Image: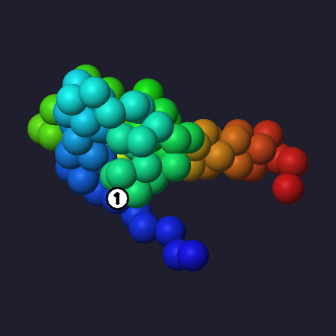
Amino acid sequence: MPRKIYKPEEIIAKLRQVEILTSQGKSAIDAIRSIGVTDATYYRWRQEYGGLKVDQVKRLKELEAENARLRRAVSDLTLEKLVLKEAASGNF
C-alpha cells in the first residue's frame, strides 16, 4: 500500500478534525481511524504540530530548511579549514 505524503496544512486540518470528532463524543481511536491514518502517525503529528497554526508551521519548515543549509555550510567550511591547515603545515 503506497504511503501518502501529507502537507503541513493537511496535517493540521486532520488534527483539528480529530479534535472535533472527539469533542462530539467519538472515541479517540475511532476519530483517528476516520481520518485515515494510524494512531502512531496521529500521535507523532500531534507531538510535532499540536497547537500550531498553518502560518506557524510554514515558518517552522522554512527555519528547519535554513538551519540544515547553514549546518552544511559550516561543515564545508570546517573541512576546508582542516585541509588548508594540513597543507600549511606541509603534511601532504
Residue lying at 52% horizontally and 49% vertically, measured from the top left? 38
Residue projecting furthest to the front: 25
Q: Position of residue 56 (x, y in %)?
A: 18, 33
Residue drawn at x 15%, y 40% is 54
Q: In which quarter of the image is the N terminus?
A: bottom right
Q: What element carries label 1?
A: loop
- Residue 27 appears left or right of 74: left
Nearer to us in this view, 71 or 25: 25
Q: Is 2 located above or below residue 38 in the figure?
A: below
State the image quarter where residue 57 is shown. Answer: top left
Looking at the picture, which amino acid does disc 1 mark?
Answer: Tyr
Residue that mark 1 sits on = 6
Of residues 77 and 14, the one nearer the viewer is 14
Is residue 67 something one can see in this rendering?
no
Residue 17 horizontal/vertical position (percent): 23, 41
| Residue that sits furthest to the right in the current view | 91
Q: Which residue is drawn at 40% across and 31% down?
A: 27
Location of the C terminus by quadrant is: bottom right
